[in-house]
């Protein structure tokens, strides 16, 4: 599905990631952890083609990312839902319009998709906030809206970068339950987080692989997790 | 062809979604509208100048090329005899269609702009003028001069070449100036819209990043900007063109004493030509924005 093979990434003269190999199998659940600045976000960007590796190979859906045109990468991203810590909304559009954005840019028939949109907005608990603007939402509501936008195209893979970074414990548990539910539907999930308590809590509910970036390399986390 | 029609339809009717995803951009909208309007207003005048000078060059080039003037300067008692002799020579010269002596009224009318209406032409030693109209084949000027020198010693033949050539050249230069002005105006519109589009693209870098993140193709993103700037270029130029046409329409009318500047304007079907200005402005805006958008998007992840 998505595979990194001996990938390295350098930025500003220094190597941020080195010799990273990783394969995201369909239906798998991964946590990616490591200290701030370790390269978690960079690794996620490599996984959805926002960055090109300086060495090694990234394969997106059986094709080397270097061989993909910009249009091909755009099409690949429709199969990868991304949740950012800062959510990245368009603040002049309503919550439901932001959630529907992937449908809009894919030229889907919005009349046909309207029922799905309503159902999804209800599933993440934002039915009452559908017409609000993003700045009017709380941190938890923003993260749930970002998750809804990431999954509205029913992607094969969901990549979440610190999705619980700006929410309280109760809300982070609620978000995790949504992600675990998506994994049970067959979606491949990778969550980058430095919140070890969140990982420990999730491991009791889902069979997850925990990866850690340490000294520019990726390794399986120890038994403490 | 179908692709082009679809593109045109997409441009004019538009995609509500792609239009909405990019937030309104206040100052660039007004900048584009104003620039397109002002340039279209100037383009109307440049077009009018080109067309007026074309007409003038044609008139000087064609109409005057078919006429000549014979001037007879002789002592007072010999004017009539020499005029008669000259007319006889002219009537027997191959290539001359008609030749006639101007009446004193016509000569007074020619001098009126300089000496006023009460000039006593009869009492002044003014040369007699004979108007010569040529046939299409023209006449042998050198041969005619030789005959006149022998038979009408006071006659001087002026075939207008000496003063017509620089006037035609000046009119041609003015026409060229008009077209160069139109090209410069088009270039200025392109530059202004490129600047405005670049500013809008830079101001919306975050929006473009989000759109790329959710799987938007470059064509979809570019369309939102291209459509917006093309319609602004088109509508701004339409307003400028209408105002320019009104201004041209209310210029002083052409008359015999007014010189060529009072003839600046459109005649007949030429009034349709300014309608091409908004279309060209829209086309320039389309190309400029599309190029700017493609260049900017290419540099984004």
Image: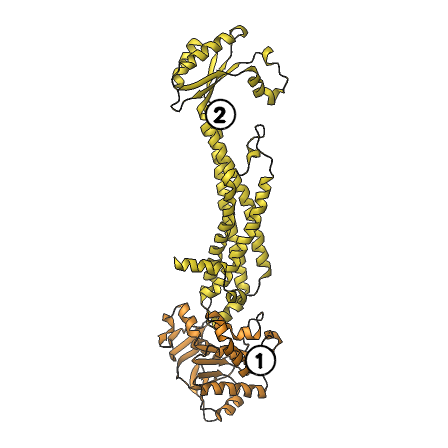
Please tell me whether mark 2 sits on a helix, a strand or a loop. helix
Name, please, the residue furthest toward the top.
B77
Q: Colour of chain A?
A: orange
The tally of labels here is 2
Distance between the Cα atoms at labels 2 and 1?
86 Å
- Chain shown yellow: that is B
Q: Is residue A76 above or below residue A32?
A: above
Mark number for residue A74? none
Give the left or right position of residue A138, taking residue A47 as reference: right
Q: Is residue B23 above or below residue B265?
A: below
Q: Is residue B199 above or below residue A110?
A: above
Residue under the image location 50 percent in, 43 percent down: B273
Q: Would you name the residue on which mark 2 appears?
A: B163
Q: Does residue B243 appear in this view?
A: yes
Residue under the image location 46 percent in, 24 percent down: B162
Which chain is mark 1 on?
Answer: A
Residue under the image location 40 percent in, 60 percent down: B3
């Amino acid at each position: 599905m998505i595979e990194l093979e001996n990938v390295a990434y350098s930025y500003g003269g220094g190597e941020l990631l080195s010799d990273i190999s990783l394969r995201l199998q369909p239906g798998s659940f991964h946590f990616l952890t490591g200290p701030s600045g370790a390269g978690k976000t960079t690794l996620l960007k490599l996984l959805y083609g926002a960055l090109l590796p300086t060495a090694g190979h990234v394969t997106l859906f059986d094709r080397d990312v270097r061989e993909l045109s910009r249009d091909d990468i755009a099409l690949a991203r429709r199969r990868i839902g991304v949740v950012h810590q800062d959510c990245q909304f368009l603040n002049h559009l309503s919550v439901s319009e932001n959630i529907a954005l992937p449908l809009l840019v894919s030229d889907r028939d919005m009349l046909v998709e309207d029922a799905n949109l309503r159902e999804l907005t209800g599933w993440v608990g934002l039915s009452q906030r559908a017409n609000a603007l993003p700045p009017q939402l709380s941190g938890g509501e923003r993260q749930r809206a970002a998750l809804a936008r990431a999954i509205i195209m029913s992607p094969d893979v969901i990549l979440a970068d610190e999705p619980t970074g700006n929410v309280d414990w109760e809300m982070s548990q609620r978000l995790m339950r949504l992600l675990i539910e998506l994994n049970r539907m067959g979606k491949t999930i990778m969550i980058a987080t430095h919140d070890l308590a969140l990982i420990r809590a999730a491991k009791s509910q889902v069979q997850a692989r925990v990866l850690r970036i340490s000294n520019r390399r990726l390794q399986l986390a120890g038994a403490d997790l | 062809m179908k692709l082009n029609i679809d593109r045109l339809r997409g441009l004019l009717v538009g995609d509500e979604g792609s239009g909405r995803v990019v937030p309104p951009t206040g100052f660039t909208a007004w900048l584009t509208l104003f620039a397109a309007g002002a340039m279209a207003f100037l383009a109307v005048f440049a077009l009018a100048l080109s067309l007026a000078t074309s007409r003038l060059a044609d008139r000087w080039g064609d109409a005057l090329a078919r006429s000549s003037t014979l001037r007879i300067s002789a002592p007072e008692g010999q004017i009539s005899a020499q005029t008669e002799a000259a007319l006889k020579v002219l009537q027997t010269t191959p290539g001359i269609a008609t030749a006639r002596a101007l009446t004193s009224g016509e000569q007074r009318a020619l001098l009126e702009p300089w000496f006023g209406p009460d000039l006593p032409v009869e009492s002044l030693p003014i040369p007699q003028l004979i108007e010569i109209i040529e046939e299409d084949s023209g006449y042998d000027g050198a041969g005619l001069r030789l005959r006149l020198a022998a038979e009408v010693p006071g006659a001087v033949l002026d075939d207008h070449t000496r003063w017509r050539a620089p006037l035609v050249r000046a009119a041609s230069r003015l026409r060229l100036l008009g077209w160069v002005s139109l090209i410069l105006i088009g270039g200025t519109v392109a530059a202004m819209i490129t600047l405005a589009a670049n500013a809008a693209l830079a101001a919306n870098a975050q929006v473009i990043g989000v759109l790329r993140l959710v799987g938007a193709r470059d064509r979809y993103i570019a369309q939102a900007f291209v459509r917006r700037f093309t319609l602004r270029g088109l509508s701004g130029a339409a307003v400028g063109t209408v105002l320019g046409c009104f201004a041209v329409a209310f210029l002083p009318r052409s008359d015999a004493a007014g010189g060529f500047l009072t003839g600046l304007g459109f005649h007949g079907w030429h009034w349709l030509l300014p309608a091409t200005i908004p279309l060209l402005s829209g086309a320039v805006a389309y190309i400029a924005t599309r190029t700017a958008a493609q260049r900017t998007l290419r540099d984004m992840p």
